[in-house]
Structures are given as C-alpha cells and as structure tokens.
Amino acid sequence: MTKKVLVLPGDGIGPEIVTQAVRVLDAVNEQFSLNIQHESALVGGAAYDETGSPLPETTLAKAKVADAILLGAVGGPKWDKLDMSVRPEKGLLGLRSNLDLFSNLRPAILYPQLADASSLKPEIVAGLDILIVRELTGGIYFGQPRGIRTLENGEREGFNTYVYNESEIRRIGRSAFEAARQRGKRVCSIDKSNVLEVTVLWKEVMEEVAKEYPDVQLSHMLVDNAAMQLVRAPKQFDVMVTGNMFGDILSDAAAMLTGSIGMLPSASLNAEGRGMYEPCHGSAPDIAGKGIANPLATILSVAMMLRYSLDAKDAADAIEAAVSKVLDLGLRTADIASKGCETVSTQAMGDAVLAAL
Amino acid sequence: MTKKVLVLPGDGIGPEIVTQAVRVLDAVNEQFSLNIQHESALVGGAAYDETGSPLPETTLAKAKVADAILLGAVGGPKWDKLDMSVRPEKGLLGLRSNLDLFSNLRPAILYPQLADASSLKPEIVAGLDILIVRELTGGIYFGQPRGIRTLENGEREGFNTYVYNESEIRRIGRSAFEAARQRGKRVCSIDKSNVLEVTVLWKEVMEEVAKEYPDVQLSHMLVDNAAMQLVRAPKQFDVMVTGNMFGDILSDAAAMLTGSIGMLPSASLNAEGRGMYEPCHGSAPDIAGKGIANPLATILSVAMMLRYSLDAKDAADAIEAAVSKVLDLGLRTADIASKGCETVSTQAMGDAVLAAL
Ligand SMILES: CC(C)[C@H](C(=O)O)[C@@H](O)C(=O)O
Ligand SMILES: CC(C)[C@H](C(=O)O)[C@@H](O)C(=O)O
C-alpha cells in the first residue's frame, strides 16, 4: 500500500533544510522499499504571498489525506506587520488544530559528539535525554474569547483565554504516560496550581490518569520551579507534560540546554498516531538562503515520522545511525561548529548523511 | 521623621531568614541613625493557621501605612489542599494587588565569589547582571473571569483570563525604561505576539513608551526565544520587561543561571516608590526549621528597601559591602557550599554580616 507524505517547506531556512530531508526520505524509501509518495504544498508566509492565506484550502485538503506531514518552519519579519489572522504562524496553528494534532513530543537529547555545544557544564548535561509532551491544540493558544477591544474610557485592552476541559487534559496525560512507559517510567506534570484555576483542574486530572498507569510514577512541579530545575539539574526529568503555552517556553529552554537546537526533531500526533513532523527550531530568517542552516533536525524529523506514522522502524534506525556517523566523522554545520571539526554547508551535510546511509 | 517597616516573616524558612535580616536592619538603623521602627505581622499559611485568612485585615491595615515591607516567603505543602481562595499565596497576591505594587524588580547577578555555583559554563555567566522587570498586579494572575465550571456534557472546564489594558502596560514600561536609564540603557520586551492578542497590544504600547526615552534602546523577543536565549547567552540582556506570568517563569530561570538563588533579592514597587522587599527564592519547606537556609537574599532585600523606599543609600551600600566581604571570607550556607569554603548556619551567616558591618 502506498503511503502519502505531504511536504511543507514553509519559510526562511525551511525550503533548504526540507530539500535535504526529502533527499534522505527518498533514499530510505528506495533502500527499504517503503512505497512512500510525497508531494509539496504551500504554508505560512510563502502561502500568504502566493494565495493571501497562510493555510490555503488546497494545502489543508492534502494534509487531511496524508499519512504524515513533514514541515520546515514558518514565519519571518517580512510578515510581522500583517494582521494576526493571516500571519504565517496561523498556517501552522491551523494545521495543528484542523488535524487535531494535540500531542506534541519534543525530545531534548544531548548528542555525545556535541557535548561541548551546550552552555551548561558537561556534568550537568552529559547524557541528557528528556521528553517534553506539550498539549498542542488547546489552552491559551486557542481559547475564546480573545482580541483587543476599546474600553468605555477610550483605552484599549488585550485579552486571551486560558482554558482546558477534562477530556483535553486526559488525552494529553495518556500520551505522556504512554511515552513514559517506553522510557524511564516517570512523568512530571507542570502547572501553576497555586495561582491558576485551569491548572488546578489539570493537576487533578493528571492524578486520575496516573491511576491507569500504576507502573509509571507521577510528580507535579510549578512552572516557575520547572524553569529553574531545567537550568539547575535537567537530568532529574524523564517525561514532562504540560499545556500549550508552558510547553512552548519549557521545551525551547530544554532544547537549548543541549546547545544544539539544530539537532532536535519533534512530532505532533493525533489520536490515531497520524502526525506532523518538524524541527524544534524556527525559520531563522537571518541565515535563510545562505546554505548554512543545519538540516539534521529535519532529517531526524523524517526518522521520527517513519517510526511513529509510517511503520518503518528500520528506516528510522538507519537514518539516526547515519546522522550519528556523520557527527562521528567530525562534520558540523555552522550552528554546531567546533574546534577540530569541519564546518560544512546545508547541502554537504545532506550529502554526508546520504553517503552514510 | 520616623520610618515604619512592616516585617512579614511568613512560612517555611521565612521566619529564620527574616530574623537575620532584621538584625542587620537594626544594626544599620543604629549605625546610620535612620530612625526606622519595625513591627511584625502574620501573612500566608502562618496567618491562615492563626486567623483563617492568609491576609488578615490587621496585616493589610499595617501594610497600608508602612513605608516599606520586608517579606520572608509564603506557602508549603501543609496548605496545598486548601481552597485557592485561602491558600498562603493569596496573602502575597493580596498584598501586591491591594498596595498596587505593580513593578517587580528582579535582578539576576552573579557574585564573582560564587561563579562556581552556576550550572552554566563560567564564560557564559561571568559578570552576569540583568534586571527583569515583571508586571505584578495584572495579567493572567488577576484576570476575570476565572474558575472551574461544569459544562453541559457534565465535564469540568478550567479557565483563566490573560488581560492587560494600555495604562497597565504603559506604567510597567516606564518602570523598565527608568531602570534601564540607570544601567545599560537597553530594554528587551518579551511577548508572544505571534499568537496572543494581549501581547500584540503589549508590544505596541512598549513602542509608544520607547518614544519617551530616546536614550534607551528597545528590542522585542518572543517568550520562547527569550527562554532559550537566557540559557544560551544571558549576558546579551540588560533590562527585560514582561507580564506577570512570563515574568514569573523567566525571572526564576534567570535567577537560577547564577546558581545561587539564595542570594537574590527583589523589590515590588507602587507608583510612589513604596514597596515590598523579599528574596527571589521560596519558602523551602523541606529545610525549614533546620537553621541552614541562606539569609543573604533577605539581607540584600533590606539593602534594596533602604535604597528604594527609605532613602538610605549609604546604609544600603554598607550592607551590600558587608555581604561581599563575608563571601570573600569564604563563608557559605549549604545551598552555595563550595570546596575550600566554610559551610555555616543561617544564624552564623547573620553574625558574620553583622560583624562585617
Ligand atoms: C511559531 C509559533 C506559533 C510556534 C508556537 O508557539 O507553538 C512555535 O514557537 C513552536 O513552538 O512550534
Ligand atoms: C508564590 C507565587 C504566588 C509567586 C508568584 O507566582 O508570583 C512566586 O512564584 C513569585 O514569583 O513571587
């Protein structure tokens, strides 16, 4: 049976890094006879420029029938002054919400070959391997009412709504516990239950979910403390589960602990395990078009896609092994450049992974 | 003229550290003939246990007539199961809001003597000196509506409201720009303007405020990126200004970069410069009563209080010099213990600061 992958290069460095990732996808497709077909579509600023919408109907239609989606990145200063409703980010948020991709898995792993890249002391981060499970289709990102209104005194007021119901919390809780079962069997749920009612409910529902997973240990931590603990002693965590906004902040902090956010893939899954895969980093408009961006996070996103959505574990393993080999060979893009290593271009890094396959 | 200081020891290690801070206050009061009178009152869990309220009327009344307030810390597991409305934290939030202490100044400074305590590499944090200006009486902490309701389908839903109007943003903006004028003349405003409307307004108003301060440079950063940049290269910042919730998270992360959150004071000021002073750290219930807590953040909060609210700059300088001297002498409480240094108790640390004065 043919599997369909939709490729969405997006903006900034998106097209460059996706080009390399697709070469890798093509290679394993042939090598492992995976019968994968892929086509591209527009999303984000690129889609807005072409069609006036950051998520054109045709793109959404293709996304809905795809078995998996590979996304580069969206956004850039070019579109910053646009109305919120048509900004590139709305394309990404529209995909997440229309496809019900509520479970965002963001691993923060320190590659032993890149231990030096971290701004933290080696003993604090050596062997780091944590997974942040972020709720992706609810919370304050999507809560209503929202907007900017004019008050009676003539002043403007901006407002957003942070909201979660029990089923939304339960399903992301289960995602986290399932993931923890495959790993260190510990879930730390992050809330601000000393101030925010919505996270009081969050904490309660997590306690309920925990009863379904007696083999997994649940703990709770306040979000401000979690931000501190990530800096102080990140290896204390196995799986962290949290809402959309806290997850956005904490997963970026966690990714940066490794010093090599250009290496980190992510998956956004729906209830059936169909998903969208993308690098943790953004569209990096400042280096777009220069051919120096690191394609490895996107290449590793292909591996995640093969493993979680396309039932091709061997191909996923092969890609991850190839990336590791390339690092062993001392090849580095500029973002992870290091003394004694060779700094290579986006394309050369793609070549090297293909060669290692 | 007599100046009145209200002392609120609070919970956990609060009483222990405040005891030492008050000894220091008494010493400079005499030494510099400051004519300061102080009295104590209950707040937080201690107040709840005694009176059923985390912020008794008598405490609030005393706070309203005080020239400055010195607070230890509030909260602890003992009160975790209480209804939100009477939790210890409500005492703190009630003080902030009733006294209109909208401007929270949280310096993150790395003491050269404690450079080793950081989990970050020395070259990343050496000389770190940033100031986070956090809005403290608005945003999602206080927004209405809020609560947990039951939906028609029988499920519960939790909700909070993230809201700011123009004047709230303008006054905290001005606080930040005023502070920047005394420092590196750079303000970085943190928002999530690619997703949240309330922070679109935030960003706009910051641009307006910036026009009043042509000598100060304004930049903007998304909160997820800010969390990353704090880990990657914190010295790029001078003053960061942000809302209540983002400020809670980022200021704790920033404080932890120093590795010695037990050293960091904070000030919460109203429009007239009256304020409440407290350590950045919490009530640390796990070590409460053991006599090992670090009193220096609270002692340094006294220095901040003297400088900002009591017009006693010399006394403030003297305290800060005394703390620095004690560190030079190699005295450390357990949280900042280090090879070759002497680990001392809370009380012994207080003694040492007094001796150094
Ligand atoms: C681009 C932006 C809307 C997005 C988010 O905030 O979710 C990004 O920061 C991310 O984390 O994927
Ligand atoms: C105790 C808590 C309510 C408080 C806050 O969230 O503001 C604390 O974390 C702080 O930062 O002062």
Image (cartoon, coloured by chain):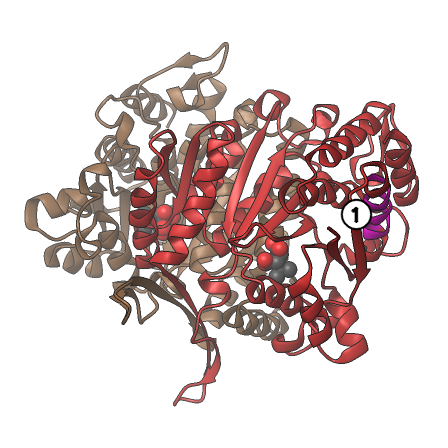
Chain colours: A red, B brown
Q: Is residue A75 left or right of residue B170?
A: right
Q: Position of residue B81 (x, y in %)?
A: 19, 45
Highlighted magenta segment, given as a residue range: A17-28
- Looking at the rendered structure, the kind of residue marked 1 is Asn
Residue A276 found in image quarter: bottom right
Residue B291 found in image quarter: top left
Above-or-below relation of A40 to B31 = below
Cβ at disc 1 under 8 Å from ligand 1: no
Label 1, secondary structure: give it: loop
| Residue at point 73%, 28% (across, down) | A114
User: Main SS type for the magenta part?
Assistant: helix
Q: Is residue A151 left or right of residue A327?
A: left
Asked whether residue A194 appears in the rendered view, the answer is: yes
Q: Position of residue B340 (x, y in %)?
A: 50, 9
- Which of these two is toward me, B131 or A226? A226
Dot 1, how many residues are within 10 Å of its Cα: few (below 14), some (14-19), or many (20+)?
few
Q: Is residue A293 magenta?
A: no
Q: Is residue A20 magenta?
A: yes
Q: Position of residue B263 (x, y in %)?
A: 43, 33
Asked whether residue B231 appears in the rendered view, the answer is: no
For mark 1, what is the residue?
A: A35
| Residue at point 21%, 61% (across, down) | B64
| Residue at point 81%, 25% (across, down) | A325
Above-or-below relation of A125 to A16 = above
Above-or-below relation of A199 to B294 = below
Q: Position of residue A317 (x, y in %)?
A: 72, 31
| Residue at point 78%, 40% (across, down) | A296
